Amino acid sequence: MAAAAGAGAINSGLRSLLLNTTLRPFTSSFLRKLPLPTYLFLPNTPSHHNFSHRPFCSISPLTTSQEDNFSNPNSISRPNVLHILEERGLLESVTSDSLRSVCSDPNLGPLKVYCGFDPTAESLHLGNLLGIIVLSWFLRCGHNAVGLIGGATGRIGDPSGKSLERPELDLVTLEKNISGIAGIVKKILVCSPGVCENAGEVQILNNYDWWKDVKFLDFLRNVGRYARVGTMMSKESVKKRLENVEQGMSYAEFTYQLLQGYDFVHLYEKEGVNVQIGGSDQWGNITAGTDLIRRLIGKSSENGAVVGNVPVVFGLTFPLLLKSDGTKFGKSEDGAIWLSASLLSPYKFYQYFFTVPDDDVLRFLKILTFLSIEEIAELAKDMGKPGYVPNTAQRRLAEEVTRFVHGQEGLEEALKATEALKPGNAATKLDWKTIEGIAADVPSCSMNYEQVLNIPILDLYVSSGLLESKSAARRMLKQGGLYLNNVKVDSESKKIEADDIVDDKVILLSAGKKNKMVVRIS
């Protein structure tokens, strides 16, 4: 009895120490500084394990046990990722302020952070990019990242921010979407060692892998009994939907927060994940996960510290990426900014950022690039100076974001197309690949080789549909606005020759600076 009372007093004192001083979780290294009797009284004390920093950006699963999550005898120093996110406007809310100290404490191991992506389309869009960027900041600060594809939750659809229930996807479409999104997340996050040599490890997981074996009665018994309807009803995503009496909310959508919440439970127990991130509209789903972990596995103290088997998990949200008019970027809107090159060419992607308004460019540089705050401040200063070349900041933004999403090869493709497609820029030689790179973004037509060869140039402008009539073409010619493969047309008598057909496949017609037509030759 005396020993038990002594242990209780010691544990009470240790909790008080954590709450009032260090605000950091217990680690084996900290425990070993305690006198031996105290050390023995603590329940389930973790044993000593050596942390080895894994090779950069490999895609193999982690097997680190739960008790090792906050133990790092190697004492690797890391930048404070929360300070970075806050400085750049990428931090909205955290479930516990102790994450600020945990994320950079050299005596603690790296965090393992996940962000979920539901496969509701075959590509992610610009609105999803912030989640990847925040994951990348964690990686660059030495933590590990998990991109979770919602192969299971995507069959239901997240009601957050939606006024209507998402349409159900057939299995063929769903599998195609899962494959497309997994490829995008993996390609972007697994950067080269030259970019972020101290980065942590990346995993791509699919929650269908564990949900496919869960039985409904088992889910109700093991998870549903811990869910409180009042708490679920109080979530903003639920309240907004229930305000619409006609639409309401289906039971499937209502339980979505439990599904996402249990994902966090599974990832915590099986993969050692201890942080979930998401947009500000995901706060309810994220806290559903931290609450489930607390109820299912143990109770966390007020500051998120751990003693014994008590779990330590955190939630973090970032602001949604909004347009200048305050609306969200989304895939349901016309002209969605897709991250897949098959849906939106690197050239078009680059052009979008090259043309953002001055009012948005500095904000986008802070949240969408990894340029230093000092360098962005210099760009801001230059914008206010006399002689500033318009769109200089936009050009830097476009280059950085395109490189991050499409890689150096994609950026070079975009830059080449941008330069080559300037009317009159005959110095840059056009090739078939460059012209095809913009074919999806400009009008195009197909014509037979015999139709094109030796046809008068003005007739080609009309037959291709670029200009309405020969008189319109003639007027444009006199104004100096007609270009054939970027070379100005000087004579009305010009006829199409074999050498005018680029790589025997295409011709690029321009009427003025913006009106173009790709003529495919068959």
Image (cartoon, helix red, strand yellow):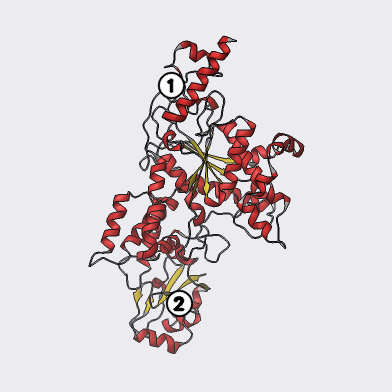
Task: Give the residue pinned by disc 2.
Answer: 453
Mark 1 is surrounded, within 10 Å at the Cα level, by few (under 14), some (14 to 19) or many (20 or more) other residues, namely: few
Residue at the (43%, 32%) spot, across then down: 55
Residue at the (46%, 67%) spot, across then down: 505
Q: Quadrant of residue 231?
A: top right
Residue at the (50%, 18%) spot, across then down: 10
Number of numbered discs overlaid on the protein picture: 2
Rendered location of residue 412, percent (x, y): 37, 56
Gap between marks 1 and 2, in whole Å?
A: 82 Å
Question: Sequence-wise, which precedes: disc 1 or disc 2?
Answer: 1
Q: Identify whether 133 is placed above or below 275.
A: below
Q: Quadrant of residue 511?
A: bottom left
Task: Give the residue pinned by disc 1.
Answer: 30
The reply to whether residue 369 is in sight is yes
Q: Nearer the viewer, residue 152 or 431?
A: 152
Rendered location of residue 79, percent (x, y): 37, 38
